[in-house]
Image (spheres, grey):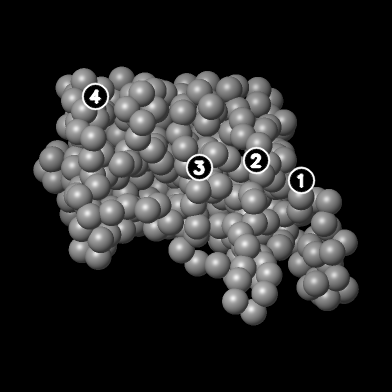
Amino acid sequence: MNVEQLRADTPGVAHLVHFNNAGAALMPEPVIEAVTNHLQREARLGGYEAAGQQAAALDNVYNAIGRLINAQPDEIAVIENATRAWDMAFYSLPLRPGDVVLTSTTEYAGNYIPYLQLKKLRGIELRIIPNDEHGQVSLPALKTLLEDDRVALVSLPVIATNGGPVQPVEQIGALARAAGVLFMLDACQGVGQMPIDVKRIGCHMLAATSRKYLRGPRGMGFLYVEKALCQNLEPVFLDLHAASLQTPDTFSLRGDAKRFENWECNVAAKLGLGAAVEYALAQGIEPMWQRIQHLASHLRERLTAISTVTLQDQGTLQSGIVTFTHRHGSATQVQQWLAGQAKRINVSTSTFRSTMLDMQQRDLLEVSRASVHAYNTEAEIDTLAAALAHLPRT
């Protein structure tokens, strides 16, 4: 992997050290150009006319995402963010009173709240899959839970927002398929970081974002819905893009996953998403994943050597999201200290309100989150470690 070229393509690295890729990664030049060029195009031509001129490029966004996750273009919907993409799939499922949804302790609050809402509105039941000794989903426990024929859905993130393990999603998918249960995957922290193949995983639905490891613009995401399932789901919201009027009293749904979209969208951001996917594919997802794991391992080694820092990661397979606590300050104080360095260092904080079940189990209120990407360097990691070692006691 040509790290020098990655960095040359990333103007932001000249100004700061960015370890907040799990929040929003630094965009490379091809993505920046795709977005800004289209905004200029809209200013010169008009919004509708500019979109019409880019019709082929917009269609190619679906092709690119399909190649990225091994799906067909007609199984992809491009939606304004991953949260809404996830919502469009989840709320469209015909869950009934007594149906059971299984999730993990690492589930994100943005997904967990909808479970509770449908528990209140439709009477579904929510059960938490126990963890194994490594802090990831226990496959034997999941197999036992799936023996209940009321289980209708397994839904969880491949990687939690507060770090934690890379879940064994291929084994989870196989168990769900064998039980005849739908499997929905939140891949926001996975897509762009590691290989994601919906056929190997066996998920029926997958939601992901543009802005994290894929390095696309904010305000854009996508949804995968397996073709056979898509034909049987009516989205909870419809418009004249998702469906067509046939008579004054009838309408018909689109035959593809675009039934989950709506007509209006940020065309510049959509083109930026396409450019981000093409850029990631050109670099190679597997080489990027290998480099991310190398950098994360180097960071964990450096942090372990600091007596005032405690690593908080779990799992047999760990991601590029490295989480820790510091004895000299809160996660917010750590973030502020690093941002105030001569060359700004970006990290983020993750609180118990984002992943409440996991954090409560581990008796944590918050963690600092340093998330590496392939364009980061060992020298940047050393700079971060040195700054953390000198954090003054508050």
Which residue: 54% across, 39% down? 228
State the quadrant of the C terminus: bottom left
Disc 1 crowd, CA 10 A, few/some/many (<14, 14-19, 20+): some
Describe the element under mark 1 as helix, strand or loop. helix
Of circles 1 and 3, the one toward us is 3
Do labels 2 and 4 touch, CB within 8 Å? no
Describe the element under mark 2 as helix, strand or loop. helix
The image's mark for residue 60 is 1
Marks 3 and 2 sit apart, C-alpha to C-alpha, by 19 Å
For disc 4, the marked residue is: 143
In the image, is 384 to the left or to the right of 367? right
In the image, is 22 to the left or to the right of 363? right
Q: Is residue 56 visible?
A: yes
Disc 4 crowd, CA 10 A, few/some/many (<14, 14-19, 20+): some
Marks 4 and 1 sit apart, C-alpha to C-alpha, by 39 Å
From the top left corner, tell me how far across and down residue 330 is, in percent. 22, 52
From the top left corner, tell me how far across and down residue 332 is, in percent. 29, 56
The image's mark for residue 65 is 2
For disc 3, the marked residue is: 229
Do labels 4 and 3 touch, CB within 8 Å? no
